[in-house]
Amino acid sequence: MFRTKSPKNKNAKIKTNMNKHQDQSNTHHVPVLLEQVLTILDPQEGDSYLDLTAGYGGHAERILERTKSPRQAVLVDRDDKAIAVLTGKFAEQGVQIIHEDFLSASRELIASERQFDVILADLGVSSPHLNSAERGFAISQTGPLDMRMDQTQKLVAADIVNSYTEAQLADIIQRYGEDPKARKIAHLIVQDRPFATTTELAYIVARAWPGHSKVHPATRTFQALRIAVNDELGLLEKSLPLWTQLLKPGGRLAVISFHSLEDRIVKQTFGELAGDRYDAELRLLTKHPVVASEQEIVFNPRARSAKLRAVAK
Ligand SMILES: C[S@@+](CC[C@H](N)C(=O)[O-])C[C@H]1O[C@@H](n2cnc3c(N)ncnc32)[C@H](O)[C@@H]1O
């Protein structure tokens, strides 16, 4: 069983255990499936480019090297730290940078009749999110139960954990974490709350899973809370059809997902819009999802669960 921190420490002042290594990794993110993204999106000189989850600009940097047209590029992210880094890296070249969730940004771009040759959405959280204890995403580092990608948003993970009903919690953990012990975990949470920190919550959730397992038993619960706090699936479902509208004729759209719930939505939407019908709006560029090589996974373990699907107009 994973022993993190005793619940007795529950009311202790929150101290994030950041160390020098975490500090350095706070702005470092290795882009996944980079070569595959370049091959599939095939950016050409002069192409316009929309990155809906630009993060720390790893993919953007390489795509812009190919398009050589920064004034035709728009980079979106909902995280203010990512926006600060993107601004420092790209604003001077004339790249447009938008601090917003990708649904709102897509609606605005459609309203202003913009279309792009190359569109990328590399979903989920970035390494700096996971490596910064104070953001509350990491199971093994003590931090507040926050988990917001956009820190201007009101709802934090602590609100869900400490105020939702047992049934609501079980539903979130079941639906977004696909954890077979969802009901038991929800019960343990409600019995022992309020919780202030990630490690206190992880400790209690681990009690639902006695014995040893390779991954921390709270992994699914943390995924579920993160998805709920950031409405990740809702935003993706509503945004995907808009992204196809934002494609120019001949344009290419690639989406990288990191868990089966996201991938299911991408697969289904692309399947509907890029079917075998003669009047299909889109053409599938990836019959099967593209995944990382063993070599990439050794170098960047976050790539293990990445799945890339792409379409062309
Ligand atoms: C995996 S990282 C992207 C990394 C980026 N491709 C790079 O190479 O640096 C995902 C980014 O998407 C952002 N993000 C996630 N969901 C979002 C949403 N709904 N709207 C806007 N940005 C979002 C996160 O804040 C994070 O910075």
Image: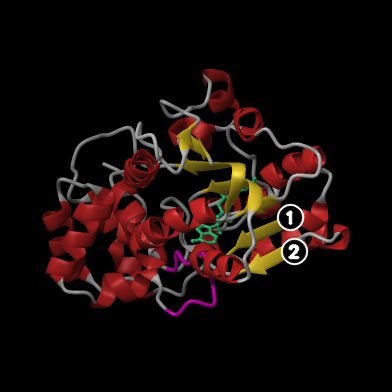
Residue 184, above or below 68: below
Q: Seen in the image, is 146 located left or right of residue 181?
A: right
Question: Badge 1, how many Cα within 10 Å: few under 14, some, many 20+?
Answer: many
| Secondary structure at numbered mark 1 | strand
Pick the front one: 13 or 291? 291
Q: Quadrant of ligand 1?
A: bottom right
Q: How is the image coloured?
A: secondary structure
Q: Three-letter amino acid code at disc 1?
A: Ala
Q: Three-letter amino acid code at disc 2?
A: Gln
Contact (Cβ within 8 Å) of mark 1 with mark 2: yes
- Quadrant of the frame with the N terminus: top left
Q: Earlier in the sequence, mark 1 or mark 2?
A: 1
Q: Is residue 280 magenta?
A: no
- Tag shown at residue 136: none
The residue singled out by tag 1 in the image is 73
Question: Badge 2, how many Cα within 10 Å: few under 14, some, many 20+?
Answer: some
Magenta stretch mostly in which secondary structure?
A: loop
Give the residues drawn in magenta, as a range.
Answer: 146-154
Q: Is residue 194 visible?
A: no
Q: Give the percent coordinates (x, y) of residue 197.
A: 40, 66
Q: Give the percent coordinates (x, y) of residue 165.
A: 16, 74
Q: Give the percent coordinates (x, y) of residue 142.
A: 46, 60
Note whether ligand 1 is within 8 Å of mark 2. Answer: no
Pick the front one: 109 or 99? 109
Q: Is residue 134 visible?
A: yes
Residue at (50, 51) in percent of width and height: 244
